[in-house]
Amino acid sequence: MRKIVVKTQRSPRSVIGVDLGGSRIRLAFVGPMGRRTGRVLTVPVTDRALTSVLALLIDSIRRLQGSGPRPSAVGIGIPGFIHRKKVCILRSPNFPGWRNVPIRDLLEPRLNLPVLIENDANAAAFGEAWIGSGRGARSLLYLGLGTGVGGGVVLDGRVWHGREGLAGEIGHITIDPKGPVCGCGNHGCLESYASATAVVRSYAEKAGRPVTGLTARDVALLARGRNQKASAVYRELGRALGIAIADLLNIFDPERIVIGGGVAQAWPLFHSAMMDEIGRRAIRPVRLGERIKRGKLKDEAGMIGAAGLAYHRLGVKDF
Ligand SMILES: [Zn+2]
């Protein structure tokens, strides 16, 4: 297999950022200042088998390439546990059949471009630290509240990977050891309280009936319409987030904690319960208003962050 040599260019002008999800791929050109240039190409994923997703990724990247300048690299945010040294996906909740997939080595020769692979929440954390709500902060923790709860840690401007590359799994902090079983096998993880999946499950429990087809956004709409049960779901979500965030403040004392993902759009519904809980538990709960922020890049954080990390790989460090 041919190796792609990364040449440090004086000024790479364009990189493609890719957000690979279980149901869709989104990608766009991103400039060196973090600004998206041109449209976001969205491609549905209908077959999650590895060969099909690889073919779809390559086809989508080529399609986008045809509409703009030649990119210097591709950065891809991927849900799942990624081994740092081997650059392989150990496993992914969104792609259940994938095991130990050396995705960078599979893509680079076919694209003939340097490819940067990163866990999607780590990429989103980097994006928010680069040009989002964490801009200027040297230390940032990110929580992405989506189908699950992703997490990322940026310290001194770099993603903190830990020994194996699996650091930052904030979604699997234990909130209640007797709580519901999480996808990771443990009980009562933050993900079991603060994800979109948890919102729907919790509402169904309170309503005492199955709620087929209901989404977390629907529950938020009910809460805004003063539905007591729906409001209680989001207050409980706020408390669980507050417990986790107080721990994070006590451990890291970070400049910024950014909360993104689709569920974060219900911010007014859980914000005060979250802040109350942090106030009770953090050792020194100061300047919380300026340290704890909603994500600014919304659903583009992962895509833009993956592009930013690709710029880093090209040797651009002047962020
Ligand atoms: Zn878990």
Image (cartoon, rainbow, N blue to C red):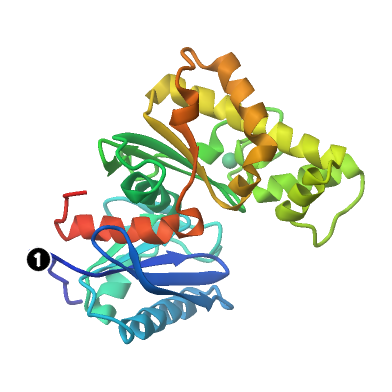
Asked whether residue 233 appears in the rendered view, the answer is yes
User: From the viewer's perspective, is residue 34 above or below residue 220?
Assistant: below
**Residue 188 in sight:** no
Local SS, label 1 = loop
List x then y, in percent, for residue 306.
34, 59
Residue 253 locus on image (x, y percent)? 39, 23
Point 50% across, 58% down: residue: 299
Using the rendered view, name the quadrant where residue 163 is placed: top left
Count of marks overlaid on the render: 1
Kindly indicate the quadrant of the structure image that contains residue 190. Answer: top right
Q: Residues within 10 Å of mark 1 (few under 14, many from 20)?
A: few
> Residue at (41%, 76%) from the top-left corner?
57
Where residue 11 appears, as percent x and y from the top left, is 12, 64
**Which residue is most to the right?**
208
Q: Residue 275 lies in what quarter of the image?
A: top right
Instruction: Look at 65% across and 33% down and name the residue there.
Output: 238
Q: Is residue 49 left or right of residue 224?
A: left
What residue is pinned by disc 1? Answer: 9
**In this picture, residue 90 sits left or right of residue 280:** left
| In this rendering, position of residue 57 left or right of residue 111 | right
Q: Amino acid at mark 1?
A: Gln
Q: Quadrant of ligand 1?
A: top right
User: Residue at image x 55%, y 29%?
Assistant: 244
